[in-house]
Amino acid sequence: MSLESRLLSALAPWRQAPAWRVAFSGGLDSTVLLHLLARLARHEALPPLSAIHVHHGLQAAADAWPKHCRRVCEPLGVPLEVVRVTVDSGPSLERAARDARYAAFIDRLGVGEVLLSAQHRDDQAETLLFRLLRGTGVRGLAGMPESRPLGRGSLVRPLLQVSRAELEAYARAEGLDWVDDPSNTDTALARNFLRHDIFPILRARWPRVAETLVRSAGHMSEADELLAELARIDLQDAQGGCDFPWLTLPSLDLQALAALTPARQRNALRHWLSPLTPLPDSDHWAGWADLRDAAADARPVWRLATGELHRADGRLWWLAGEWLIAPLSNLTWTDPRRPLELPGNGRVELLGAPPAGRLEVRYRLGGEVLQLPGRGHRDLKRLLNESRLPAFVRGRLPLLMVDGVLVGVANLPDLDGSRQGGWQLRWTPPTNDQGLSW
């Protein structure tokens, strides 16, 4: 089967996309991909084709690449967008450049559009070996996926079953011109070391090593799918049963999770946490055991990359974003007919006729007392204990004060004003998302 036919077959699921956009570095791989697509577009009904070149400005040679990319795109009739990015300094320049590049792609990818990237079979083999040497798990050993969501669209790698030798043979047969990144020869970088020093030795002994490694990645991908299926089964019983439906944070029933074997616990948690935070390596999973096995009256916390896992009232709770920052207190509510925005803590509103007097919203400091019909003055701490509200919520639960006197507690039946005042204090808590309050 020709290279064109194989590419077209790989892209069959994406033929109805609004647009195809090629991540075009100007190197061999992306040059061949762009040329193949432009040729296919002459006799196939394909989505509109364009290219994006990200200029990092990290080396002098790169300054000439945007001009080269224009020279390639113009005769092919492919529109080119050149995006200049700033790469943050940090421990890994490679990682920072990758992050800046993908941020540029995400920013420019429209709804349903497809970004086509030219990684090939040899890249996949290098990825697998690199991750194996780093001690990654099954998901990492599955290698680069052929497609995945990216921003408002998708990232697709249609050449993962094609070798670099095939791409180079095509480029030379078509007389294509491409740029060579000088950094690709720097064997101080791990991937270049594998490519230039290790893989030639492996190929001398096992000529089909890249193909074999890619096949292993396929096996790992299937194993990862089975582990995900098992995790979904194990999470079914653990995801329900929250007594506070207004508290929409991700949570799990600890007893249902703890009933599983330790390996299945970790598998279920990996699946549940993966959309929420980068996962810890094996050495840091001791934090899960400490959280699970802490005393019943303890308040353990497992801190992860982008948030925290708390244990409260027999459940695990994922906290991130504004939930990790103490809210501002003592807000005067001048117009209780309108919802009051709570900085860092969602919003609160009064349903019904508001009580007369000077209204404030405060948070707990300790020692508060609430007057309840038929029950007299009750200590707020004891009332909250009776409600079984998770401890991490109590310090940010809005309290309604009238002329300095506590008259209501948001969202808790019998305490929210609906019994004693004919009004109701309703709180919409913040989400876990950065930059979103409700």
Image (cartoon, rainbow, N blue to C red):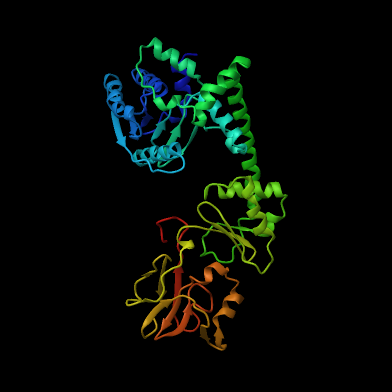
In depth, the one of 188 and 391 nearer the eye is 188
Give percent across and percent down for residue 277: 52, 49
Is residue 351 toward the left or the right of residue 73 in the image?
right
Residue 42 in the image: above or below residue 225: above
Give percent across and percent down for residue 320: 49, 57
Residue 62 in the image: above or below residue 343: above
Residue 337 in the image: above or below residue 65: below
Q: Which residue is drawn at 44% across and 12% down?
A: 169
Can residue 237 be seen here? The reply is no
Q: Residue furthest front?
A: 188
Q: Which residue is drawn at 60% across and 45% down?
A: 281
Quadrant of image for the C terminus: bottom left
Q: Which residue is drawn at 40% across and 72% down?
A: 349
Give percent across and percent down for residue 29: 42, 22
Is residue 211 toward the left or the right of residue 346 in the image?
right
Is residue 268 toward the left or the right of residue 172 in the image?
right
